[in-house]
Amino acid sequence: MIGRKKESEQLQRAYESGSSEFVAVYGRRRIGKTFLVRETFNSRFTFQHSGVANTGTKIQLERFRRSLIESGHAKCPVLKTWFEAFDELKHVVQVSGVAKKILFIDEMPWMDKPNANFVPALENFWNAWASARKDVLLIVCGSATSWMLNKVIRSRGGLHNRVTVKIPLRPFTLAECEELAESIGLQATRYQLAQYYMALGGVPFYWNHLQRGLSVAQNMDALFFAGEDKLETEFGELFSSLFAKDAPYVRIAEALCSRRLGLERKEISALTGIANSGTLTKYLDELAQCGFVRRYRIAGKNVRDSLYQMVDNFTLFHFRFVRENTDDDPKFWSASVDSPLLKAWGGLSFELVCLEHVEQIKRALQIGGVHSLNYAWRCEHPADDAERGAQIDLLIDRSDGVVNLCEIKFSSGLHVIDADDDAAMRNKLTAFKRETRTRKAVHVTYITTYGLAKNKYAGDVQSEVTLDDLFDE
C-alpha cells in the first residue's frame, strides 16, 4: 500500500487494543478511505456494509439486512427500523468466534435519512452495548466530511466524545504521487508530475486514470476533454456527494476560484448573493472541513478581514479549464500547451502546490522544527501614487524572529531574475514592512522548479528551494 503508513498503524493499534474501539475515517470522495481499511485488515471483517447513494430508508434497511445475511446471520428477519438493524448486528458479534470483531460501515452518511432515527440507533448500539465489551472494533467511513464531523466526531448528542480514534485522510503528497506513478508504470519527470499534481491534486483515484505511454498533454485531454467521461463529470459528483444541497457551495467555490489569494466574507457575499450571515459561516466552515477552503489572517489586519482561499487543485482546474471548454474541443489541452493561458495557470497552480508542501519547504530551509504561520499577503492600496500594490505568494512567519518572503516561479529551466523582477521584489519588501510594521527580519526566498540562474540580482536572495525539495518525504 502506497503511503498511509501512519493511518494504517492507527488502525492496527485500535485492533490490538484491549478495549472496544470506535474509529472514524473521513475525507473527500476518491481519497482512498475504503482502500485503506480493506488493505489494512485484508478484508477480514466480521461485518461489512456500505450505504447506498440516493435511496430511501426502506432500501437502506434491505441492503443492511443483506449484509447481515452475508456475514452469517442467515435467519435475519426483515428490518423495519434502525434500532432493529443494530440489534441484529449484535447477534453477528455474539456468534462470532474471532477475538476482535471488526465491524466496517462505509459511506455511513448515505444511511442517515430524515426521520429514520439512524444516529440515535447507532448511539444506542455503541453506548449501551458495544462500548461495554472489549472485543469490538467499529470502523465508520464517509465522504460527506461535514456529516462525519457534525454527526459523529463533534457530536453534541449521544456520540459526544465516543469516537476513540479519528483518522482524517489527506491528499497524497508529491512524493506519494511519484511512488504511485511508478507503481502504475507511468514514466514521468518530476516536472511532469508537478503538472499532473496542479490539476489532479493528491487524489489517488484520479492518478490511477493516467495512461502509460501518453504525454502530459495527451493524458490531460483523455481525462478532461476527449469525451471519455473519465473525470469530466467528476466535479458535479464530488460536490453532490459532500453536500445534500450543493448549489450554494458550488457558487462559493466558483467565487473563490476567481481570486488567487482569496476573498473576504463581504466579497464572497457580493459575488454569490449569499447574505453575509451565519448561513455563509456554515457554508465556509463546511468547505474548510472538507479541505477545499482555508481561512487565514493577513499580517497587520483584523480577524474580521481574514481571507478565504480555494486550495483544492481539482476544483480550480475545473473552473479555469473544464467548464470554459465551451467548444468541446477534445484536444483542448494539446492545442493550448504553449498558450499564455496555460503558462499563467502553471505559475498560479504551482503556488498552490507549494502551499500544500510547506513542511517540505521548511525542511529544505532547515527550519522544520520552528513553529510558523503560513499565508499569502496582499496590499492593494499603496501609500502614494508612485508605489504599486503588492502581493506575496507565500509568507512563512516564523516564531524565531524571521519571515521568509517566498517568491514562487514555475518554469521549464533556470529562473532568471531580471531588473523588473528585482524592482517588484523590492516593492513587495517595502510594502510588507510598512503595512505590517513587522520587527522580524525578512528573508527573500525563491521557490523554483530548477533553481536560479546566477546573476547580479540573485545575490539578494537569502535562500532557495527547488521542485526536488518538494518531493521530500
Image: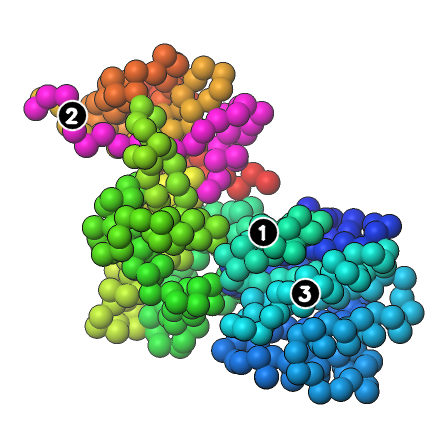
**Residue at the (29%, 59%) spot, across then down:** 251
Residue at the spot of label 2: 382
Quarter of the picture containing the C terminus is top right
In space, the residues marked 1 and 3 are separated at their CA atoms by 14 Å
Residue extending furthest toward the left: 385
Q: Is residue 60 above or below residue 339?
A: below
**Residue at the (89%, 66%) spot, across then down:** 98
Q: As shown in the figure, which amino acid type bears the numbered disc 3?
A: Leu
In space, the residues marked 2 and 3 are separated at their CA atoms by 57 Å
> Label 2 neighbourhood size at 10 Å, few (<14), some (14-19), many (20+)?
few
Say left or right for 79 vs 181.
right
Residue at the spot of label 1: 156
Mark number for residue 60? none
Determine if the magenta segment contains residue 357: yes
Foreground label between 1 and 3: 1
Dot 1 lies on which element?
loop
Say left or right for 275 vs 308.
left
- Find residue 366 and report its horizontal and vertical position in percent: 54, 24
Residue at the spot of label 3: 122
Comes first in the chain, label 2 or label 1? 1
Determine if the magenta segment contains residue 233: no
Q: Is residue 379 above or below residue 273?
A: above
- Find residue 127 and report its horizontal and vertical position in percent: 74, 58
Comes first in the chain, label 1 or label 3? 3
- Find residue 187 and report its horizontal and vertical position in percent: 52, 57
Label 2 with label 1: CB-CB less than 8 Å = no
Comes first in the chain, label 2 or label 3? 3
Instruction: Give the magenta range.
Output: 356-385
**Residue at the (83%, 69%) spot, across then down:** 93
